[in-house]
Image (tube, rainbow, N blue to C red):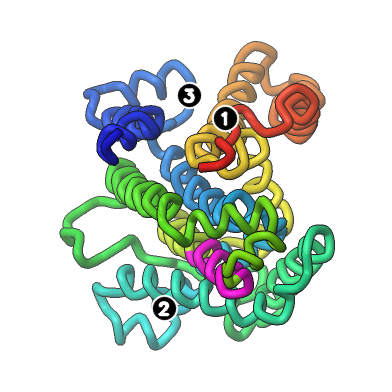
Amino acid sequence: MTPRLAALRVLPWTIAFLILAAAYPLIPGLDDQLLRVTGLPIGGRMPKLFIYAILALGLNVVVGYTGLLHLGIGAFFGIGAYITGILTVPAYPFYQSFGPYGFLVSLLVATLGAAALSVVLSAPVLRLRGDYLALVTLGFGEVVRFALRNLQEITAGTKGLNPVPPPGFPFPAEWNWAGDYRFFYFLTLGILAVILWVLWNLERSRVGRAWVAIREDELAATCMGVNSAKLKLLAFALGAGLAGLAGCLYAHKQGGTADPDQYGFNTSILALLCLILGGIGNRKGVLLGVLLVVGFDEILSPIMDSYIQRSLGQAGPEYLRFSGWRLAVFGLVLILVMRFRPEGILPARRGT
């Protein structure tokens, strides 16, 4: 089978997802019609799903490809967001230096900065495995969160850095980023598509196969000449770089960095939950997991809350709020998946 035919066989669901996602804003009146039915601007919330998909794909490089349990990916998500804030918020001198190029500079620096910091912090703990590595990454995530809270002269503490301006060059200045959701929609979707393409090629490269070998049996891979330390560092760097890129997009989308608690343990667990439900090591599974988990949290839950309020009125009991039960729903779904589908809804194929 030729590589082109193999690509069409392996990627149909991913291609279908990207085509449907790209077509949504192009259908006249569809978003307005859904807004009248659901009371929720779905198109304006979709870029957040794409951003979390980039974050989850970064975690999938470390957990899915290499088999290393990482519980601190939210910290690099926050590092990317705060690097973006420091480089683009008018209160800092960098804003004048970069001018309209601030978006491109922040995107590059946030990605490379998060990747470089990951290499520096991961190098001393490469010998750790399993629970011990998970505890170290968890501790690092908490250290970053408290550092962002306490370095108020740099990070503004719990207030966060704002306003982060909308992207400038190479986009036309007359684009209304705040009033038209489609600009951020296509920007984040386009970057997600590029990342999916890069990861698809990386999976089938020597590096990707070496990662899988380390995941399956590190000792055997080392005996066959695989440099496990170097490849682990590369996986940590790539995963953190994608998380930093996602953090940069998140800061531009939100117009600020938000509270440092947004980048703590809950964010790391949310990304890990997307992998577990969708299928660890499978890009299509990661996308499905993000649609289920983040889509439930960002789209379905507010729609159900609005429906309950319209049905019962504002005086309805607090315990009937659908969003208040979301963690219980997450826990129940996770239990069911681990019981009946332990490898996820779309498990990765072994031996590829």
Task: Judge left or right: residue 191 versus residue 158.
Answer: left
Q: Residue at x 39, y 88 (%)?
A: 93
Q: Is residue 184 magenta?
A: no
| Amino acid type at mark 2 | Leu
The image quadrant of residue 312 is top right
Which of these two is toward me, 150 or 350? Answer: 350
Query: Does the rendering let one see residue 211?
Result: yes
Query: Does the rendering let one see residue 160?
Result: no
| Amino acid type at mark 1 | Leu
Task: Judge left or right: residue 348 versus residue 85.
Answer: right
Residue located beneath label 1 in the image: 346
| Amino acid type at mark 3 | Gly
Residue 14 on image: x %, y %: 39, 34
Element marked by disc 2? helix
Q: Residue furthest front?
A: 224
Q: Main secondary structure of the magenta part?
A: helix
Q: Residue at x 32, y 27 (%)?
A: 20
Residue located beneath label 3 in the image: 39
Q: Earlier in the sequence, mark 3 or mark 1?
A: 3
Read off the magenta span.
Answer: 228-241
